[in-house]
Image (tube, helix red, strand yellow):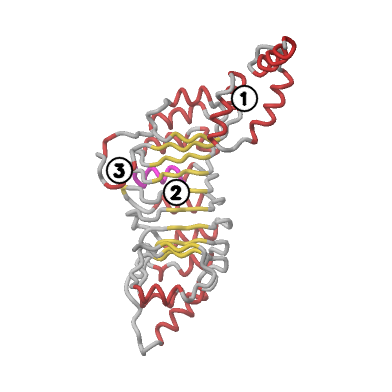
Amino acid sequence: MAEQESIKFVRCSSINGIGNSGAEDTVWELVIPYVQDHRDRDAVSLVCKRWYEIEASNRKHVTIALCYTATPQRLSRRFTYLESLKLKGKPRAAMFNLIPEDWGGYVAPWVEEVGRSFRRMKTLHFRRMIVKDADLELLAKSPAGKLLEVLKLDKCSGFSTDGLLIIGRSCRNLKTLFMEESTIVEKDGEWLHELALNNKVLENVNFYMTDLTKVQSADLELMARNCPSLTSMKISDCDISDLIGFFKAANALEEFGGGFFSEPPRQIVEGVCNEQLGRNSAESFPPRLGCLGLTYLGKEEMPFVFPIAARLKKLDLLYALLDTEGHCVLLQRCPNLEILEVKF
């Protein structure tokens, strides 16, 4: 009995760092990086001090559900080698205008710490937070800005196109720029030109459901030509008829959302305009496009979608102007559809 208790003690002391646990540490240093689920990682960090240190040293991503539950300095002290950070500010109620605009959720102290302490940061995701142009400028000019590959300003506010201009001019390794449903003060469209000119590795650009209207189709076409890996583009209100050059140049595009038809096509003779509209769309849509969401799509514009309907795997009709019959007519032409988004 005494021998068994002794064995148990040695094993426990080894795990808790009391005994000579160099070999065990080496094993866990190799094993823990393969633990991906955040709940499992949290459990691992609670086993003992040594496991806490090992887990912290190889953690690549952290999500903070409320930005006031921790401080930037505490984050940098524990996770020195972070590559990805997701930070949430205002509660979900802010989406329904139930939270004052000045409630809080400022990214400034976090951006300062990222620029000062994190030398490997590649992904930043700010959700429902207040982002100032000065924050974007500080981020762009910091060492992290040179490495940044993903910047998501998700339902954020407080910044303007001046801040985006600096990001587009300085952050030249961006693969993803996401600003869906953010409140952005628009001064001009120069930010998009700089982004298209300086970021040749772009894969995903999203400013869907924003008030950015000074978007030049020539800049979108420039982006398509300069960025051969561009696979997803979701834009604000821009006339589809002005995007023919963009569609023809974006050979790798797999997803497109946004845009609108400024006026319904006029029928010269019954059916003639619809056929012409369909032929034009068949020639203009990129060959790999399989995910589509056109804003304010109506019955008269549906022929624009028909030529590629059979290859669509995802269709976003949340903001379409179709009745039940229109939905049925369109969906009958989409036999390979896997994802459908609609409002009831």
Q: Which residue is mark 3?
A: 93
Closest to the observer, 161 or 128: 128
**Distance from label 1 to label 2 (Cα)?**
33 Å
Q: Which residue is mark 1?
A: 54
Residue 291 spot, x, y in % from top left: 50, 63
**Distance from label 3 to label 2 (Cα)?**
21 Å
The quadrant of the rendering that contains the C terminus is: bottom left
The residue range painted magenta reads 159-168
Residue 312 spot, x, y in % from top left: 52, 68
Q: Amino acid at mark 3?
A: Ala
Q: Residue at x 44, y 26 (%)?
A: 72
**Distance from label 1 to label 3 (Cα)?**
37 Å
Q: Residue at x 50, y 76 (%)?
A: 307
Number of other residues with Cα within 10 Å of mark 3, as a class: few under 14, some 14 to 19, many 20 or more:
few
Of helix, strand and loop, which one carries label 3?
A: helix
Q: Earlier in the sequence, mark 1 or mark 3?
A: 1
